[in-house]
Amino acid sequence: MDHTALELIELGAVFFALGALGRLAGRIGLSPIPLYLVGGLFFGQGGVVPLGDIGEFTQLAGEIGVVLLLLLLGLEYSAAELFTGLKRSWMAGLLDIVLNAAPGAAVALLLGWGPVGALVMAGVTYISSSGIIAKVLGDLGRLGNRETPVVLSVLVFEDLAMALYLPILTAVLGGISFLGGLQAVGISLAVITVVLVVALRYGRFVSALVDSEDREVFLLKVLGAALLVAGFASALQVSAAVGAFLLGIAISGSTAENATRLLEPLRDVFAAVFFVVFGLNTNPASIPPVLVWAVALAVVTTLTKVITGWWAARRAGIGRLGQARAGAALVARGEFSIVIAGLAVTAGAVDGELAALATAYVLLMAVLGPIAARVVEPVARALQRRTASITQAATDTP
């Protein structure tokens, strides 16, 4: 068979399978991310139906998927909202880092993956999935709840932390010297500062530059700007993902809303390819040896995220049910964890088992997060009733 024809057939099969998996995820009320990862494992090396040579297309499509994920995440925030969220949540944000980065780093060191592996796994277990959390809150009708701004503030802090973490990780993975690493971080801080200042004072000009009444022209300008900024950011060792995120922050108002509507379908397609590519690069046979560690991390970091959200909500004066909902809402991990692990695996700077552990961990957390958010309120109410009945019985006893 002609090589091009075979590639088209394989790509068609992959996209059709992704569509079927996405529909299945919607029916059972879960994020499609774990099913996309499973699809990648199915089609990858060591999988049931290994694909041929479509690596060049899927690799580039996956990179575009990361850029679009971070661009649309940036479009959700204005610079003013970021500053407000940072002021409101910095203490909870620091607690979040300590409680949730430490387990991943500790496991990496125990498995002998060294400081680089520890840095990667710390990021994998630290960062919550904004996409999954936003969808779950919307599905459960909790966007107007009192604890939701607290949850969003913690997510904003995490996103800003990623803007600093990713350049550091990129420098470390690239084997850059200590001085070179400091230079990369300095450049990153300078770029972030400049972009935030521009977004605060001149965001309307950035929005006007990419805006257009013609949908086709608007889409091409926004997508082109995102890829250009991501490319220049990557050349400066700031990370393409961070560059896209900062561009999203700089675009505001109705322009940001229109861009989100236009880019969401593209993001979903390319992001799905990214998750599949990560699965393609992970041998399913490498998962069982690290499955116990993945389960242990899932249990520990579920508890630490619940503690983070509970503490942040309590500090904000939210009631006990709200505290429980805030804690459970932060549990899910997803796209960012895979982005971090994907950067490390692509650079070839970490043990191959790290990809397997990250895949198993995200599969567990992307499923566990929505479940925890759904069941936490009934469980908390039952515990409240139980406590109240015990207290009443103790009071009635002479």
Image (cartoon, rainbow, N blue to C red):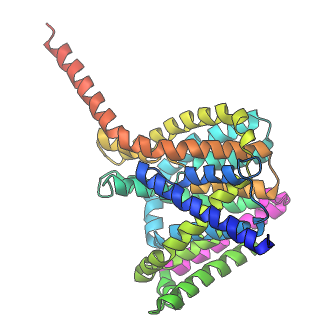
**Residue 194: x, y in percent?**
61, 77
Residue at the front extreme?
Answer: 1
The residue nearer to you, when weighing 28 against 133, is: 28
Residue at 79% in and 41% down: 113
Q: Can residue 303 be seen in this view?
A: yes
The residue nearer to you, when weighing 163 against 215, is: 215
Apparent side of residue 158 relative to residue 329 in the rendered image (left or right): right
State which region is magenta. 171-200
Residue at 79% in and 46% down: 352
Which SS does the magenta portion mostly show? helix
The answer to if 194 sits in the magenta stretch is yes
The residue nearer to you, when weighing 174 against 37, is: 37
**Residue 209: x, y in percent?**
53, 90
Does residue 62 sit above or below 89 in this rendering? below
Residue at 54% in and 66% down: 268
Residue at the top extreme?
Answer: 398
Apparent side of residue 347 relative to residue 104 in the rendered image (left or right): right
Residue at 70% in and 47% down: 48
Q: In which quarter of the image is the N terminus?
A: bottom right
The residue nearer to you, when weighing 344 against 368, is: 368
- Number of numbered markers: 0
Does residue 220 sit above or below 301 in this rendering? below
Q: Can residue 239 be seen in this view?
A: no
The answer to if 260 sits in the magenta stretch is no
Q: Quadrant of the C terminus?
A: top left
Apparent side of residue 342 relative to residue 389 in the rendered image (left or right): right
